[in-house]
Image (cartoon, rainbow, N blue to C red):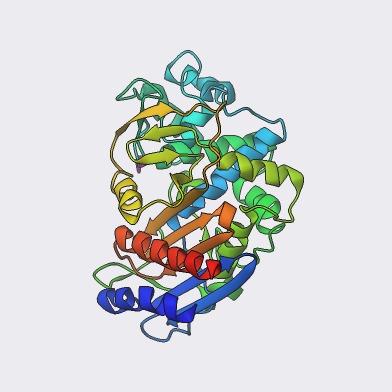
């Protein structure tokens, strides 16, 4: 196993001069960790499976889980229009935009939250004037706005701050003791320093809706625990189990991507070319077609999510039916396609090894 991981990750570490990298694998309930480099170029510590990295948009999978948890708890329906939960938006576009549109990037909302927005009031003012570039639900347009709103609405319906709910509903029940939105003082020494592609030190810039969209700092150990909770046989609370299952349901097809609730899905075994083609389409506007929920596929699925902040790179992928999954975390920006390739190749080789 170590040889498989080394062969996949060491060329990227050398090519991009990655200061540190953490790799976590889960294979039929067994965990394996492989750590490389340091938490900082100067004065850092060796990377471990408890080292904290910014996971960027992998955070969105937690927002999806919370929204699905709110639905499983009877607090909302993903078919609800956004205006039902934000009454100030009634009578306009958001009577047509549903929570499911937010969670599948089919609302039409753009990627970034405008920098001038710093409160619900200014967000509502912005949304009141916004008009979708396509009829609602017809195109997939990747959106921090949409997932940020989804997480915020779910938290409002559950009656507590977003970060507190993620901690009590997800982190603590799954034993994720090394995951935070705000890293406490006593853990700062374990918080890896991030670096841009040009090797400038940098850390996350927080903005409105940052917590659901890209706000989690986590470790390879904790994210492996999260992946295991997304697989059959996980020993978790039944409501959380239902919620996680709902995040895996195919909702729309957009070009090469089958979009679940945040997770992107491919039939397993997919080819690397198929997965890379989907990744290349992530930020493009793609025509979207609803998936027939009444005819669920029995085909095993490969689910994944990429994540980036300006100084960190993350990738998680798993095949629930095979009970295999991988976490890749690095404290420097490097190409997303390379992360996807590394994760795909390692999982493919692990699956082959498991057959032997």
Determine the residue positioned at 47% across, 54% down.
Answer: 58
Quarter holding residue 4: bottom left
Determine the residue positioned at 29% across, 25% down.
Answer: 133
Determine the residue positioned at 43% across, 75% down.
Answer: 5
- In percent of width and height, residue 303 lies at 48, 50
- In percent of width and height, residue 232 lies at 66, 52
Q: Which of 16 and 131 is in front in this view?
A: 16
Residue 203 visible in the picture: no
Q: Is residue 314 left or right of residue 15?
A: right
**From what the image shows, is residue 61 above or below residue 259?**
below
115 drawn magenta: yes
Determine the residue positioned at 43% across, 49% down.
Answer: 207
- In percent of width and height, residue 280 lies at 28, 48
Residue 247 visible in the picture: yes
**From what the image shows, is residue 218 above or below residue 319?**
below
Q: Which residue lies furthest to the top in this view?
A: 91
- In percent of width and height, residue 198 lies at 23, 70
Quarter holding residue 286: top left
Magenta residues span: 112-116
304 drawn magenta: no
Could you tell me how many numbered marks the image carries? Answer: 0
Q: Residue furthest front?
A: 356
Q: Which of 47 and 271 is in front in this view?
A: 271
Report the predominant secondary structure element of the magenta stretch. Answer: loop
């Amino acid at each position: 196993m170590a040889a498989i991981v080394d062969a996949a990750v060491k060329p990227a570490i050398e090519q991009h001069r990655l200061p540190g990298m953490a790799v976590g694998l889960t294979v039929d309930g067994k965990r394996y960790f492989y750590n490389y480099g340091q938490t900082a170029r100067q004065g850092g510590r060796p990377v471990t499976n408890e080292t904290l990295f910014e996971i960027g948009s992998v955070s969105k999978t937690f927002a999806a889980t919370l929204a699905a948890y709110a639905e499983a708890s009877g607090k909302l329906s993903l078919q609800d229009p956004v205006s039902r939960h934000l009454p100030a938006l009634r009578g306009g576009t958001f009577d047509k935009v549903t929570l499911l549109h937010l969670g599948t990037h089919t609302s039409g909302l753009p990627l970034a939250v405008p920098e001038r927005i710093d409160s619900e009031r200014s967000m509502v003012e912005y949304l009141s004037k916004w008009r979708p570039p396509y009829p609602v639900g017809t195109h997939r347009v990747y959106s921090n706005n949409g997932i940020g709103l989804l997480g915020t609405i779910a938290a409002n319906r559950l009656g507590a701050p977003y970060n507190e709910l993620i901690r009590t509903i997800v982190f603590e029940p799954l034993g994720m003791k090394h995951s935070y939105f705000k890293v406490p003082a006593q853990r700062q020494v374990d918080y890896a320093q991030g670096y841009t592609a040009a090797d400038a030190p940098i850390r996350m810039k927080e903005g409105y809706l940052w917590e659901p969209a890209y706000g989690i700092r986590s470790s390879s150990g904790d994210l492996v625990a999260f992946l295991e909770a997304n697989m059959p046989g996980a020993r978790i609370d039944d409501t959380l189990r239902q919620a996680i299952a709902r995040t895996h349901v195919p909702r729309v097809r957009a070009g090469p991507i089958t979009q679940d609730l945040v997770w992107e899905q491919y039939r397993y075994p997919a080819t690397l070319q198929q997965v890379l083609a989907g990744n290349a389409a992530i930020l493009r506007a793609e025509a979207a077609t609803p998936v027939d929920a009444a005819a669920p596929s029995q085909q095993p699925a490969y689910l994944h999510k990429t994540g980036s902040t300006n100084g960190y790179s993350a990738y998680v992928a798993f095949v629930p039916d095979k009970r295999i999954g991988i976490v890749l975390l690095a404290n420097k920006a490097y190409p997303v396609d390379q992360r996807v390739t590394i994760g795909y190749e390692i999982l493919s080789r692990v699956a082959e090894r498991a057959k032997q």
